[in-house]
Amino acid sequence: QVQLVESGGGLVQAGGSLRLSCEASNSTDNLISMGWYRQAPGKQRELAAAITNDGRTNYADSMKGRFTISRDNAKNTVYLQMNSLKPEDTAVYYCAARRFLLLRPSGNGVDYFWGKGTLVTVSS
């Protein structure tokens, strides 16, 4: 069973930056897609950004130009650099991974692996 451990969340002022990290361990073969979802209070979970093992990326429209996802396959780690943060970026950010298939916007599927989440709070 793949384990995903996130780090890097915290409190930041609007306009600031944070970098999230997620390290995968245990049976990490064929993790084609890794990425980050987020869920704000009272809102549905949404896919923030995803990256494949060959470097293809996908971003939610609201994060394009501000967030950058990257991946170090040798370290089984995915990163999310978040710049120009806004109060509406406040959410719990979850790392996710999937073998063989891409992450879907909904994040629904029995073959997803999930981290426990890290809280990002952006103050105005």
Image (spheres, rainbow, N blue to C red):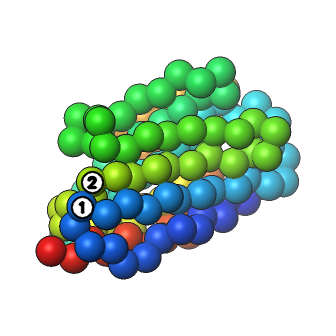
* Residue in view at x 84 percent, y 47 percent: 27
Q: Quadrant of residue 89?
A: bottom left
Within 10 Å of disc 2 (Cα), the crowding (few <14, some 14-19, many 20+) is some
Q: Quadrant of residue 76?
A: top right
**Relative height, residue 102 to residue 123 (above, below):** above
**Which of the numbered marks, if any, corresponds to residue 23?**
none
Can residue 114 be seen from the camera position used here? no
2 or 124: nearer the viewer: 124
31 or 55: nearer the viewer: 55
Q: Position of residue 105 (x, y in %)?
A: 36, 38
Within 10 Å of disc 1 (Cα), the crowding (few <14, some 14-19, many 20+) is some
**Residue position for label 2:** 84
**Residue position for label 1:** 15
**Relative height, residue 88 to residue 73 (above, below):** below
**Relative height, residue 83 to residue 10 (above, below):** above
Q: Position of residue 10 (x, y in %)?
A: 43, 76
Can residue 76 be seen from the camera position used here? yes
* Residue in view at x 60 percent, y 64 percent: 6
Find numbered disc 1 in the image and state the secondary structure of the residue it sits on: loop
* Whole-number angstrom distance, CA of label 1 to CA of label 2: 4 Å
Q: Position of residue 99 (x, y in %)?
A: 67, 34
Q: Position of residue 101 (x, y in %)?
A: 59, 27
The reply, left or right, for residue 45 in relation to residue 78 is left
The reply, left or right, for residue 17 in relation to residue 73 is left
Callout 1 amino acid: Gly
* Residue in view at x 66 percent, y 64 percent: 5
Callout 2 amino acid: Ser
Image quarter in which the C terminus is found = bottom left
Find numbered disc 2 in the image and state the secondary structure of the residue it sits on: loop
Residues at circles 1 and 2 in contact by the CB criterion of under 8 Å = yes
